[in-house]
Amino acid sequence: MSTAEGFVHPEFVIETETLEGQLGDAHLRILDCTTHLIPDPKITYQVVPGRADFERGHVPGAQFVDLQGDLSDKNHRFRFMLPSSEDFAAAMSRFGIGEGTRVVLYSTANPWWATRVWWLLRVFGFDDAAVLNGGWQKWSREGRPVATGPANPASPGNFVVREQRPLMVGKGEVLQAIGDHGTCTINALLPEQHAGTGGNTYGRPGRIRGSVNLPAAHLIDPATNEFLPPAELRKRFEAIGAFDKRVITYCGGGIAASADALALVMLGHSEVKLYDASMSEWATDPDLPMATG
């Protein structure tokens, strides 16, 4: 299979059938990463961890991870920001993750809650993680096994951060990328948010000046909740000029941007970074240039 036809890194997604065959494996750790964002005009949105969904039904053996509570910097003024390596390692150890474990991530909401956790693991040097293709929606639609109630506590793991990769960027690097023909800055928000004509805003409407749009939602087949085939994903990224350049992905708060980032990594792109604070920072700072239309 040629690179154009398939993923260069197919190991970063796992199919529902494959996961079902691995249930009960002593080395497997499954995390339900569901978070819901409830629109709230005063503060953009309320963050609601999906624990109730988890207790109604989850993949057997899974544990629930609260992205904001467990895996984000609680002292930062923006939500969902990269935690310290110490805090991340402690959380992963609580979930039984460490040397020799394999991690599968999924969500009952949009897939990018799972891709965000995949990106965090990658930042902290852990590559043996995959996102469940089609998520909970496909798993339950196919009638695969379901467990209910709270998770059984995990035996603690020993997660060691051996390297912290520079895969997150701040506003300085994003500013430098404006007008730089060697960098493609991709907005993963919806077209109306990119244009500044509608949808949730994070302050000023519109986009980072010079950025192009490939919404995370346009990487997913709406009928199945799975990633589009590799050739179709490649075509969409090629249409915005994402290959042969460094890429920075962003969205509202660094979540949806992780789906674009994962897709590019699976397609073999080697220089992808994510603007962690995204529009939560950019749209609220009048000194940072934006565009609409």
Image (spheres, grey):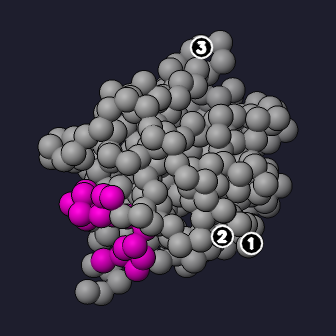
Q: Secondary structure at mark 3?
A: loop
Looking at the picture, tell me which residue is in the foreground, 95 or 205: 95
Foreground tag (1 vs 3): 1
Position of the N terminus by quadrant: bottom left
Residue 116, image x and y in percent? 55, 50
Q: Which residue is mark 1?
A: 163
Q: Residues within 10 Å of mark 1 (few under 14, many from 20)?
A: few
Which residue is depicted at the point 44% across and 38% down?
151
Which residue is depicted at the point 30% across and 64% down?
22
Say whether disc 1 or disc 2 marks the residue closer to the N-terminus: 2
Q: Which residue is mark 3?
A: 41
The residue stretch that appears in magenta:
6-24
How many marks do you count on the picture?
A: 3
22 within the magenta span: yes
Say whether disc 1 or disc 3 marks the residue closer to the N-terminus: 3
Q: Secondary structure at mark 2?
A: loop
Residue 72, image x and y in percent? 69, 42
Position of the C terminus by quadrant: top right
Q: Which residue is mark 2?
A: 125
Q: Is residue 206 left or right of residue 191?
A: right
The Cα atoms of the two marked residues, 1 and 2, are separated by 5 Å
Q: Amino acid at mark 1?
A: Glu
Say whether disc 2 or disc 3 marks the residue closer to the N-terminus: 3
Looking at the picture, tell me which residue is in the foreground, 244 or 268: 268
The Cα atoms of the two marked residues, 1 and 3, are separated by 40 Å
Label 1–label 2 contact, CB within 8 A: yes
